[in-house]
Image: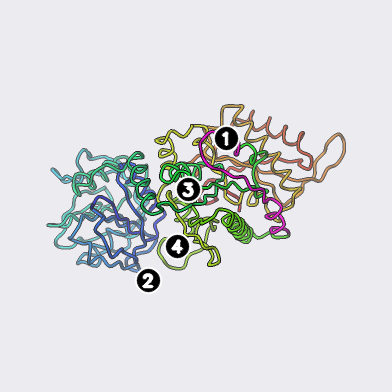
Amino acid sequence: MQNNVLILDFGSQYTQLIARRVRELNIFCEIKPYNKVPKDLSSFGAVILSGSPFSVRADDAPHPDLSGIRGKMPLLAVCYGAQYLAHFHGGNVAPSNTREYGRANLSYIKGEEAFFHSISEGSQVWMSHSDTIQKLPENAVVLASTNDVENAAYKIKNENTYGIQFHPEVYHTTDGKTLLENFLVNIAGLKQTWTPDAFVETTVAELKKKIGTDKVILGLSGGVDSTVAAVLLHKAIGKHLHCIFVNNGLLRKNEFEDVLKQYEGMGLNVKGVDASARFLDALAGESDPEKKRKIIGRVFVEVFDDESHLVEDAKWLAQGTIYPDVIESVSATGGPSATIKSHHNVGGLPDFMKLKVVEPLKMLFKDEVRRVGASMAISDDRLGRHPFPGPGLAIRILGDITREKVAILQEVDAIFIDGLRDWGLYDSVWQAGAMLLPVNSVGVMGDERTYEKCVALRAVESTDGMTADWVNLPYEFLQKTSNDIINKVPGVNRVVYDISSKPPATIEWE
């Protein structure tokens, strides 16, 4: 059924936002690198080309193969995509006299145009480009302009092909969602049927068909993703699901016992495995963040391999991988790019582990996972839990890992998180945690000089973790939390608060 949207990514920082806006319209979409267009387009009813940091005039500009798309299915080209269609099809793109970046307003909209239905002149849009379309192809017609950009939007005659030099996916474009709905629903004719209930129904059916009566091992973390994945699988295969919750020695204070207790009432078959010594021994002396992640990922695999041998005829390993994990671990444009961080549950399994991987949530953003969980009646307490990194406190302890450092950070973290709950702040924060810094600072306690650890507190608000802003917590709360940490946690004499946003900083410090 041609009811999905294909988004071709040219490396724009906003590509994931396009996907989110399409999903908010209850239409499923997938992001693919521009140079890896699927050979089978039968499931797609429309295509969107993203923006890009490249210029279409550059020698290394991305050149997509649109032969199977252009003129054959509805196509929306955003920013770079719009300039690409113009520049290489008879138009002209040149450097703009002034960098066109930031808010602008539509000063002209072509009348009786379905693309701009319910959008009026004066509507605010967001520009982000240094080139501009000076001349459109001969078979194109202008649909909208701003005071500075004549060809802000255009249409190719006799095709459902549209180009815009602004970003409809960002919040600064006030009618961006309406524009996308006009294109996808009114022009492309897509049905808005991709809902949490529909996802559960189709996914459970797919899992039943894919897995049958095979046994599946799932690593539970206590977090939202693995919990929702477990309930989905339980709906599909019931008793054939074997859940394992591993204590890697890097969990929050008392989390191993607390999480096992919480799962008791959910009807899941859960086994707790305390492998803390195994993880901490493997991490001894290692300070490099990426190597720490790799070590933890390797030991996780080893532990699950050991446990899988105890489950007779286990065939599958289920993981709670979600879309941001996949996006951040793979180059969006398919070319060389710097790895921000590797994810321990992305990238498959080593050859010696004879299990196939199943990832029922790998196409969902975090907020979508929560909505799917709510549709399956998972409790608000479980779904409202802050995200917690797979490597745990290992990437919140900067430098090498020791049992003493883990114990210190567990106490600091507990004071901070419990405090957020006590003050009614927990649900207004998307993710929070404490970092143990690899520095000592001078302090004074009881007229004595101290030289002890510094910890940083971090609290952010976000929708899916792709971008995040720091939370302006009350000074009174920060003051009490700082006093409690310094007074109650031996070895810490200084507390700081992280006020960095993502980007440029990441949510975690490693």
Q: Report if residue 466 lies within the magenta region.
A: no
Question: Which residue is identified by label 3?
Answer: 240
Badge 3 amino acid: His
In primary-sequence order, the first of circles 1 and 4 is: 1
Residue 305: quadrant of the picture: bottom right
Give the farthest residue toward the front: 312
In primary-sequence order, the first of circles 2 and 1 is: 2
Q: Position of residue 335 (x, y in %)?
A: 43, 68
The span from disc 4 to disc 3 (Cα, nearest Å) is 36 Å
Between disc 4 and disc 3, the foreground one is: 3
In primary-sequence order, the first of circles 4 and 2 is: 2
The span from disc 2 to disc 1 (Cα, nearest Å) is 54 Å
Between disc 2 and disc 3, the foreground one is: 3
Question: Which residue is identified by label 1?
Answer: 262
Q: Position of residue 40 (x, y in %)?
A: 27, 62
Picture disc at residue 60? 2
Question: Which residue is identified by label 4?
Answer: 331
Q: For numbered disc 2, what is the local secondary structure?
A: loop
C-beta proximity under 8 Å, tags 4 and 3:
no
Q: For numbered disc 1, what is the local secondary structure?
A: helix
Whether residue 143 is situated above or below residue 423 in the rendered picture: below
Badge 1 amino acid: Gln
Specify the segment rendered in magenta. Answer: 259-284
Front one among 381 and 449: 381
Q: For numbered disc 4, what is the local secondary structure?
A: loop
Front one among 394 and 381: 381
Residue 196: quadrant of the picture: top left
The span from disc 1 to disc 3 (Cα, nearest Å) is 21 Å
Badge 4 amino acid: Ser
